[in-house]
Structure formats: structure tokens, C-alpha cells
């Protein structure tokens, strides 16, 4: 269960510069969102990918001792504008087709959100149709769709994600677990129950894990922090992660470069003793 990092936390760089920078920071794997992390190839729309390009990027990370554990795809998957949704789905499907050439076992995303959280039954149906299409593509290529619940998104809680997985019962869909995304100002004081519920409902489907922290602000709002710099119960999180999914890849989020070593050491220390 090694600790990796979001590649774009190092900024947007040419991939031949990005890979050694990640390695020099002590990480053995990354979540790579191509259009966020790589500056010298145009990934703004589908169509530029090829096995050669994916291999070139994957090999650059590999020779620096860094695996690409997750391809990140930050798109709105139930977008109400059908033309935009199709573009997002096509972008995701392209990553699924080429994931193996990067050496990545999955392409992961949250579902997306609407301003104000005004979700409808049609939004849910659209998301279900999207996920069915993505699962079919993933099955063709032997990779996973990693789905993550996130507060304020259409699929914002562990029960909602469990329900979506029941409605689209593909073995090529897995869960990216992130308790920090499930916590709100309203449930923060009951965080242990939120974390335990997430593992009870989703534990068997976890294929990757995210690590950030949460902290209650003086304003009464719940803030986000680097792992180890907040008040989330990492003892419980790592204990359950060890129990349900030993050696699952953990990917740090939210960290500034000067915080990364301390945050990684914090996670490593806890997971090594719980």
C-alpha cells in the first residue's frame, strides 16, 4: 500500500521533466490527469492519442521508477448539454482504450456536479447510461472505471455510490475511496460513522484510495487540508483500508510541494502500525 500523488500538484510540465520531478520527491506512483499535468502535448480534446504517445509517456515515468496507478479524467459525466456530454464521454473512452499503454489499470472520475446541487431523476438516469457505456468500453480493454463519491456531486455519498453500482453491475467498475470527500460541516462530528459506513458499503469494490484532510474552520465551514494537517481520523481510515484492501494504492491530494514529504511520512507511519 504505497503512497503516491496527483501528478498535477507539481504543475503542468513537459512529461520528460514531470516524471523525474515526481521521482525526486520520493513517490513511486501517480494519478495522471493528462491535460492538467502535461504541457507539451495537446490533450484538450480527444483524438491526439496513439499507442506510441501513451508508451512514450508511460516509459518516461517507468524509467524514473514511477508507475501510473490511475489516469484521472476530470469531466462532467451527466452534463445536460448532450453535445458536451458526448465530448466528455468520448474523452473518457479514449483514456480507457489507451490506459494499458500507459501501464494504468484504471481511469477514474467523480460524476460531476451542477451549481446549487439541483439534481433530478433525469440526471441520475443520464449518469447511469453514461456509466453503462463506459463500463462496456472498459470491459473491452480489460481496465477499470474508478468511480468516486464526492459531496455536492450527483453521487455524493457512500449510499448513493453503492446504489449506482447496484444499477450498473459491471465487474469493471471499482471505487476510489476518499472519506474526505464524504465529510461535510454537518457530519464532521460523526466522521467515524461516515468512514465506517463507506467501507461497509463499498469496501469490497475499492481499487484506489485518495488522501486529503479536513478541518473545521472558525467560520463553521469545513475546510480542506493536506493529509496530517487537519482533524480527520486517519487511524480509522488506514486501519479499515488495511483490513479491506491491503496494498491498495493511496494517492495524496491537496499537498503543496513543501508539505509532501511530511504528509507522506504521516500516512506511512500510521498505515505501518494500524
Image: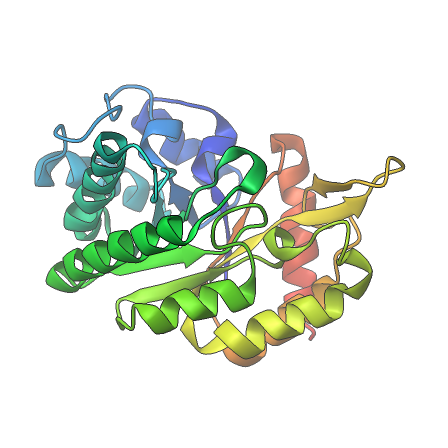
Q: Position of residue 154 (x, y in %)?
A: 47, 50
Q: Position of residue 38 (x, y in %)?
A: 33, 26
Q: Is residue 101 visible from the viewing direction of this image?
A: no
In the rendered image, the quadrant that contains the C terminus is bottom right
93, above or below 177, in the image? above
User: Is 102 displayed left or right of 254 in the figure?
Assistant: left
90, above or below 212, in the image? above
Q: Nearer the viewer, residue 165 or 260?
A: 165
Q: Nearer the viewer, residue 140 or 67?
A: 140
* Residue, far front: 121
Name which residue lies at 69% across and 62% down: 269
Which quadrant would residue 51 be assigned to in this image? top left
Q: Nearer the viewer, residue 231 or 27?
A: 231
User: Is 137 displayed left or right of 164 in the figure?
Assistant: left
Q: Is residue 192 visible from the viewing direction of this image?
A: yes
Name which residue lies at 33% across and 22% down: 14
Name which residue lies at 14% across and 49% down: 97
Q: Count every numbered label the image shows and give the total.
A: 0
Q: Position of residue 41 (x, y in %)?
A: 24, 22
Name which residue lies at 54% across and 65% down: 158
Q: Nearer the viewer, residue 224 or 30?
A: 224
Q: Position of residue 176 (x, y in %)?
A: 45, 59
Colour theme: rainbow
Amino acid at each position: 500500500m504505497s503512497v503516491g500523488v496527483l501528478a498535477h500538484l507539481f504543475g503542468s510540465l513537459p512529461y520528460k521533466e514531470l516524471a523525474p520531478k515526481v521521482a525526486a520527491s520520493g513517490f513511486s506512483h501517480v494519478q495522471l490527469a493528462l491535460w492538467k499535468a502535461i504541457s507539451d502535448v495537446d490533450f484538450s480534446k480527444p483524438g491526439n492519442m496513439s499507442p506510441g504517445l501513451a508508451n512514450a509517456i508511460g516509459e518516461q515515468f517507468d524509467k524514473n521508477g514511477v508507475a501510473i496507478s490511475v489516469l484521472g479524467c476530470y469531466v462532467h459525466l451527466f452534463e445536460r448539454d448532450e453535445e458536451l456530454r458526448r465530448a466528455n464521454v468520448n474523452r473518457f473512452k479514449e483514456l480507457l482504450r489507451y490506459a494499458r499503454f500507459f501501464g494504468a489499470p484504471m481511469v477514474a472520475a467523480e460524476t460531476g456536479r451542477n451549481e446549487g446541487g439541483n439534481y433530478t431523476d433525469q440526471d441520475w438516469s443520464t449518469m447511469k447510461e453514461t456509466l453503462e457505456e463506459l463500463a462496456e468500453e472498459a470491459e473491452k480493454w480489460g481496465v477499470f472505471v474508478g468511480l468516486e463519491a464526492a459531496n455536492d456531486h450527483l453521487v455524493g455519498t457512500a449510499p448513493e455510490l453503492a446504489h449506482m453500482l447496484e444499477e450498473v453491475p459491471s465487474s469493471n467498475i471499482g471505487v476510489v475511496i476518499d472519506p474526505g470527500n464524504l465529510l461535510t460541516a454537518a457530519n464532521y462530528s460523526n466522521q467515524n460513522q461516515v468512514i465506517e459506513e463507506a467501507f461497509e458499503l463499498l469496501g469490497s469494490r475499492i481499487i484506489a484510495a485518495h488522501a486529503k484532510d479536513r478541518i473545521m474552520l472558525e467560520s463553521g465551514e469545513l475546510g480542506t487540508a493536506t493529509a496530517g494537517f487537519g482533524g480527520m481520523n486517519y487511524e480509522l481510515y488506514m486501519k479499515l483500508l488495511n483490513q479491506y484492501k491491503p496494498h491498495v494504492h493511496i494517492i495524496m491530494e491537496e499537498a503543496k510541494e513543501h508539505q509532501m514529504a511530511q504528509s507522506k511520512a504521516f500516512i506511512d507511519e500510521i498505515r505501518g502500525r494500524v
